[in-house]
Image (spheres, rainbow, N blue to C red):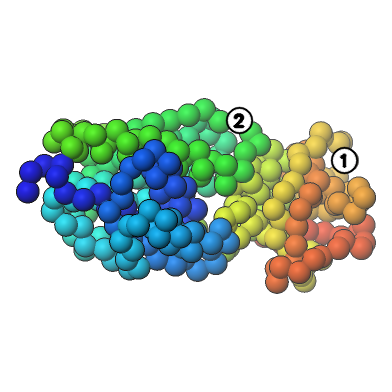
Amino acid sequence: MKPGAGNIVVCAAGLKGFAFVEGLLQEGVKIDSLVTYAQPDDQARSFERICELAARASANLLETRHPTPRAGDLTLIVGWQYLLSQITPSTVVFHDSLLPKYRGFAPTATALIKGDREIGVTALHPNVGTDEGPIIAQRSLPITYPIKIETALTLQAGLMKDLAVDIIERWRRNRLFATPQHDESASYSIWRDDTDYEIDWSSNAQAIERFVNALGFPYSGARTTVGGTETIRIFDVTALPEMHFEIRDAGKIWKLDDGRPIVVCGAGMVRLEKWQHENRSEFAFQRLRTRLGSLRHPDRR
């Protein structure tokens, strides 16, 4: 088959995948096939929305976690969490970091928790290593805090869409070149589970604000225990100025501001703005003398 004469296939999952597909269609890109799958606890309804986009675009829809890219097709992969059984020279994976930084899992959450002032995306040819393949192209943009993970992912999907439009043109001209990564500059972002959602109140207020914002929608939300018994998910906080406490007990509620707890942190304070019970029911703070949290993670300061 003549290079660039095949079909455009998009494998997309999650909120980022949905925003990517929607952006391509808005650019007038003809997607021949859409491959997707349902993710557990997908609060953004990304699977259903991607299926709706496929129907609207009259694209073939395939539900599978293990697609098999075909030689001759341009296969664009966004938000995918499973290994591919086959790779072709025109298989392109979009990774939400500026590789070789943050190879691995949840790089955007890692970047926001750390307070990076720039986020970006990379288009690469996949290989057997973890995000080690040669780089086709990259885009980046500056960010300011506070910023929600939903906003960051949507911005990154826009960058990926812009890259994809350029890559499609390069593929059609048989000029899909790539450059090897510099392994000596690599860093890694390890997988996260629910334990990693626990707020460390001994961190400073700005770090806690970043942490909460990095784990909100479409993720489950940062969590803490109340009085050592009940668990709540916290979706929004505001960092407040420092107060001098002679003995600082991080995690204690200082006061209730119209029902919103102001919590002592390792440095500074935060006011809880939006939260709910672990079972997603409403939770009201009734007592001032309440301690939040039980775990300590000094490395998160």
| Image-quadrant location for residue 292 | bottom right
Q: Nearer the viewer, residue 125 or 160?
A: 160
Where is mark 2, residue-wise? 144
Task: Give the crowd class for mark 2: few <14, some 14-19, many >=20 residues within 10 Å.
Answer: few
Which three-letter amino acid code belongs to the residue tagged 2?
Answer: Thr
Q: Give the SS element for disc 1.
A: loop
Q: CA distance from mark 2 to mark 1?
A: 30 Å
Q: Nearer the viewer, residue 287 or 299?
A: 287
Q: Is residue 255 left or right of residue 141?
A: right
Residue visible at 57% across and 36% down in the picture: 115
Where is mark 1, residue-wise? 245
Count of labels shown?
A: 2
When the figure is inspected, residue 167 is found, relative to residue 81, above or below; the finding is above
Q: Position of residue 160 (x, y in %)?
A: 39, 40
Which three-letter amino acid code belongs to the residue tagged 1?
Answer: Phe
Q: Position of residue 87 (x, y in %)?
A: 18, 55
Q: Position of residue 214 (x, y in %)?
A: 59, 47
Residue visible at 65% across and 56% down in the picture: 222
Q: Nearer the viewer, residue 250 or 1?
A: 1
Task: Give the crowd class for mark 1: few <14, some 14-19, many >=20 residues within 10 Å.
Answer: few
Q: Nearer the viewer, residue 206 or 11?
A: 11
Q: Position of residue 245 (x, y in %)?
A: 87, 40
